[in-house]
Image (tube, rainbow, N blue to C red):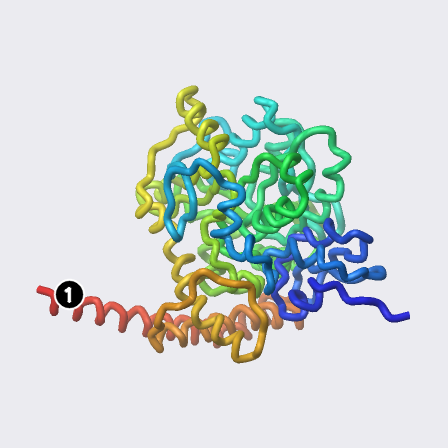
Amino acid sequence: MSRNIPQVIESVIKNDLCIGCGICVFKCPNNALEMKWNRLGFLVPELNDNCDSDGNCLSVCPFNPIPDEEVKTEYEIAELFLHGNTQYHPKIGKYFNIYAGYANEYRLTSSSGGIATFIFAELLERGIVDYIFSVQEANKPGVYYEYAINSTKEELLNASKTRYFPVSLGTVLPKIRALNGKVAIVGVACFIKGIRLAQHKDSMLKEKIPFLAGIICGGVKSRFFTEYLAGKAGVKNHFEHPQFRIKDLKSTAGDYSFGCLNKTDHTEHTIKMRSVGDMWGTGMFKNNACDFCDDVTTELADISLGDAWLPPFNKDGAGTNVIVTRSEIAEKLIWDGIQENKLTIETLPPERFLASQQGSFNHRHLGLVYRIKHAQKKMQPLPPKRFGNEKLLLDFKIVQRVRMKVRLKSLEVWAKNPDVLFFDRTMKKYLKQLKLSTKVYHYRRAIARRLKKSLTR
């Protein structure tokens, strides 16, 4: 018997644009979809039953290539959900205020400044929500982290670290109707967008989920990333309890380590991330969909949180958050925290906040131009984008092309042979090409800047 193919599989999965959020699984009216691991180490929906093809699955997809006009981009969606904001910036979105700082109680037990844990603890304590959907350690073979339902401060502390591991909201959203109370959810930009799209279609979700916390993201990594880091730390197989952001309080914020336990002898293995190389600027192990995301600052959340990668904050190994409040609830929680001496916070000018995420803006806004044209040549359908009209230098285009190659090769090489030595040896030439092309681009751009400066004197 033939079966209908869900629109999300036809339009998104087949074009390698699935981010793995799992909201389509939740919205499928006859449970025809199930999240499974694909060959490149990402969670994607697969068909497990007959599909009625009513389109619900595609309507909530953050990478839907044919969205309705009222939710065409983040601009339109923000107008539907974020009200009363006093400020706006095209790269930041709608907001009340921007800050930098940390939570005095939770800083040392968090990956960054502990603001997310503070926010969720306050939401629970004040009765604004009854549950938190956040990512915490899983007790499943090969699944190290997953979304779970928390309802106490103690449970929150177990979910207070950054996890660079694929997760899906499909593990918790199906339970939301049965929960007696309201829910707050933490997620990266694409997950937050998917939730907003689901709320737009379902008033129950809008009522049930009064608060969303957005994590400013540098890209969703494959599970291969975790396996590779464990191998670099000295555990080739059979590892557990991976930790991605182990702080060094005597060093800088960026000088953190990865660690895991050897299942065989329960020994702890750690490695400084700086010794591994650039895992973010190279795009290694990253989801392809991330290359078509132009929301750098999680514009659709009630509050956006990231790392303060700028001086003097980056000199403090304890960690500091950048904070963007976008709803009245978020703004009040921050101000009350300041007044009650629970937070050490200072106002951050927009230009400094933008500088803290400059690398991501360069890649996801400026570099988007090249990637869109590349996809269009292959007749690949894409969701509407707000950025992508700038003219690019040839050197910059070359950097983008090589980076796309590095991203894909890293996944294919590890899928072929998950061995650290083989991977490093194979990837060396591609990384060398990327380093050289980036160096040439930066060199010529510096010359152009100096020339322009001399001509304006």
Give the left or right position of residue 270, taking residue 101 as reference. right
Amino acid type of disc 1?
Answer: Lys
On the rendered image, what quadrant is the N terminus found in? bottom right
Viewer-proximal residue among 64 and 347: 64
- Residue lying at 55% horizontally and 63% vertically, measured from the top left: 383
Image coordinates of residue 175 in percent, x first then y, are 75, 40
Count of number-bearing discs: 1
On the rendered image, what quadrant is the C terminus found in? bottom left
Say above or below: 445 vs 228.
Answer: below
Give the left or right position of residue 408, taking residue 321 as reference. right
Residue 6: quadrant of the picture:
bottom right
- Residue lying at 58% horizontally and 71% vertically, measured from the top left: 381
Viewer-proximal residue among 336 and 438: 336
In the picture as drawn, the residue positioned furthest to the front comes out as: 69
Say above or below: 258 vs 211.
Answer: below
Residue to which mark 1 is pinned: 453
Give the left or right position of residue 35, taking residue 214 as reference. right
Q: SS of the residue at dot 1?
A: helix
Say above or below: 423 vs 116.
Answer: below
Residue 63: quadrant of the picture:
bottom right
- Whether residue 260 is visible here, answered yes or no, is no
